[in-house]
Image (cartoon, rainbow, N blue to C red):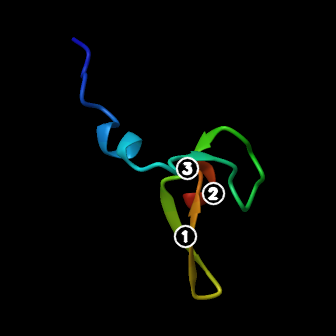
Amino acid sequence: MPKPKRGKLAKLNKDWRGTCPLCNRTGVKILWEKSDDGKPLKVCKQCGA
């Protein structure tokens, strides 16, 4: 059975898809935060792990 509400909160944010600042991948979800030099960055799932 599909889950129709999966990812609803992510899509409400306007900047949920773009280019990762660490690995420069394009068209990925950038929802995970990673602290780099005291500044929080929004990164992709692979870089956030």
Dot 3: what SS? helix
Q: Is residue 2 above or below residue 15?
A: above
Seen at 30% across and 32% down, the residue is 6
Q: Of residues 43 and 16, which is closer to you in this image?
A: 16
Query: Hey, which quadrant is residue 36 in on the image?
Result: bottom right
Seen at 40% across and 40% down, the residue is 11
Q: Earlier in the sequence, mark 3 or mark 1?
A: 1
Q: Earlier in the sequence, mark 1 or mark 2?
A: 1
Q: Position of residue 34 (x, y in %)?
A: 55, 70
Seen at 24% across and 30% down, the residue is 5
Q: What residue is disc 2 on?
A: 47
Q: What residue is disc 3 on?
A: 45
Circles 1 and 2 in contact, beta carbons < 8 Å: yes
Is residue 23 shown left or right of residue 40?
Answer: right
Q: CA distance from mark 3 to mark 1?
A: 10 Å
Dot 1 surroundings within 10 Å: few (below 14), some, or many (20 or more)? some
In the rendered image, the quadrant that contains the C terminus is bottom right
Q: Residue furthest front?
A: 14
Q: Is residue 48 above or below residue 18?
A: below
Dot 3 surroundings within 10 Å: few (below 14), some, or many (20 or more)? some
Q: Indicate the amino acid at tag 3.
A: Lys
Q: What residue is disc 1 on?
A: 34
Q: CA distance from mark 2 to mark 3?
A: 6 Å
Dot 2 surroundings within 10 Å: few (below 14), some, or many (20 or more)? some
Q: CA distance from mark 1 to mark 2?
A: 8 Å
Dot 1: what SS? strand
Q: Indicate the amino acid at tag 2.
A: Cys
Q: Position of residue 17 (x, y in %)?
A: 57, 43
